[in-house]
Every structure is written in structure tokens, then in C-alpha cells.
Image (cartoon, coloured by chain):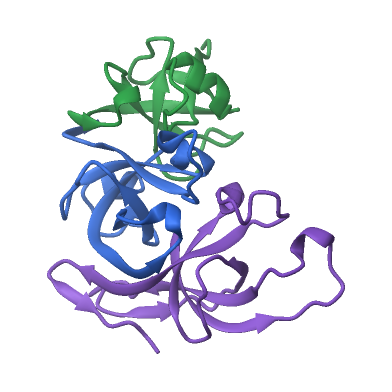
Chain colours: A green, B blue, C purple
Amino acid sequence: MRWGEVIGRTTATVKHASLEAQRLILVQPLDAGSAAEGDPMVVIDAVGSRHGDRVLMTSDGRSVRKLLNDDTAPARWAIIGIIND
Amino acid sequence: MRVAEVIGNVTLSTCHPSLVGATWLIAVPLSAAGLDGKQDGRGESLVLLDEQRAGHGARIAVAEGPEASNPFRPQLKPIDAYNTAILDSVEFV
Amino acid sequence: MFMARITGSIVSSQKVESMVGQKLLIVEPLRLNDKARAKLNSTGRTFIVVDTVGAGEGEVVLCVQGSSARFTEQTEKLPIDAAIVGIVDQVHVGNHTVPIPN
């Protein structure tokens, strides 16, 4: 699992069918010292996170496919929690 | 997934039988600076399989890793990068 | 997936059973030069890959890495993390064709 900050969102009309009606959130992964680490990521959001939230993300592809209820979803990362201030 | 910008395409003369007919794009992943429109902030190019028909210059969400081949289950395809979505907008602050 | 040029091969007589009969090649990943993106240059790195298409030394190939390298019938049970899955014919960037290095 990793954590990061919600920095934006994306919209897509043309996408893999498994992502229909999904929110695709832009998250900047952070290191232990809250500095940006790596490129921003597009992730599935299961908890309704908002801009500026610190969020917990999982890379467990199986649970993400379960979340989307679709075994063919080409996704591995999802937001599974909002971190308290 | 990362956001990447499509810069080109690749054709193959020979390929693994499971990949016949596939379309291959070249894209550069965008860092926060790249998303912000800066010319640097573009990473090393990668090749990905495209089924969404993304055009040159499009911003796409790229699945990287074993999940890239999920769309073809239960078939096995040796793919580690897949165009998941053509992004209409990237709202970014 | 990445493009790479085949620069050599590896011969190993003593190896795990599952790898018997597998062709092992040495490849150097290529990258588009920074600004014009008009040339493919070697990155200077090397990978050892299993060949699934009958590629030969000097050819530019498309490689898959990570556990996806096992997603073929040939490689499903192999202890590998990279494979060649295609031979590159043409590369287009913007409106120009990028020469394939030989």
C-alpha cells in the first residue's frame, strides 16, 4: 500500500468497459516525509475522496477487480481510505 | 496507471501469435510538471497496446504491469502496458 | 513494453529443467533521443530475455517485462521476467519515420 495526495481528476469518454461510471482520481504518491515520489497516478476511488485529501491506496489487483466487479479490468491501484488529519 | 501522452506508433513484422492484429502506440509518461504543460516532465517512452484508438498527442491512462493483460482474460497475452482510457480532461491543481 | 536491439546470446548447459530448449538473448533497450525524437539510441542497459518469435542478433524487437513475460503458452511455467514478443518493422513519431538502428 502507498499513500498520496489527491491533486486532481480525469474524465474519459472512451475507456475500457470495466471503468464505466468510475471516478478516475489523480493522486501524487508521497514518501515517508510527505515529499512527492514518482509520477502522479490515475486510480479508482472507492471512498469518495476530495481534492487535497491524503489517501491510502492499495495495489492489490484482485481486490480492485472485485471492487469493479470485473475480472477484465486493467487496473491495480485503488483508493481504499482517507487518512485523518 | 499513469497519464501518458501519445507520440507515435510501432508496427511489427513478426509477433507472438496471441498478439496478431494488435495496435502499438509509443507514449511518454507525464510527471506533475508534464501534466502542468511543461516540456520537461516527460519520462522515457514506452510501448503499449491500444484498443481505444488514441490519436497522436492524446493523453491516456496507461495500465502498466500484469494488469495490462486483464482485458483479454481468460486468454493469455504477454502485455505489460495497455491504454485503459483516452482522457478528455485532466483537472489538476 | 519496450523496444530493444539484440546484441548477443547466452548459452547455459547447466540450468533448471524448465529452461531446457529456451533461447536466451541479450538485448539493449532503446530510447528516442530527447528533443527531436528522431532517433533510437541505446540506453546502455542490458536485459536477458527469452525469445518467443525467432528473432536474431542485430534485430530490433518488442519486449515485455515482469510477470507478463509468462503470459504465453511457451513461457507460462518458466522462471523468467522478460521476453521478446515481436520484431519491430517500423517506428513512427509525430509525422516522421524513425530509422531502425542496425
Viewport quadrant of the C terminus of chain C: bottom left
Q: Position of residue A68 (x, y in %)?
A: 42, 17
Q: Position of residue A83 (x, y in %)?
A: 53, 14
Q: Position of residue C5 (x, y in %)?
A: 48, 79
Rendered residue at 55%/65% (across/down): C52
Residue C62, by quadrant, is bottom left
Against A32, residue B14 (above or below) is: below
Q: Viewed as shown, does residue A79 lie left or right of A32?
A: left
Residue closer to the observer: C38 or A50? C38
Q: Viewed as shown, does residue B10 lie left or right of B78?
A: left
Against B81, residue C93 (above or below) is: below
Viewport quadrant of the N terminus of chain C: bottom left
Residue A32, by quadrant, is top right
Residue closer to the observer: A18 or C45? A18
Residue A42, by quadrant, is top left
Rendered residue at 53%/42% (across/down): B66
Rendered residue at 79%/77% (across/down): C12
Residue closer to the observer: B62 or C12? C12
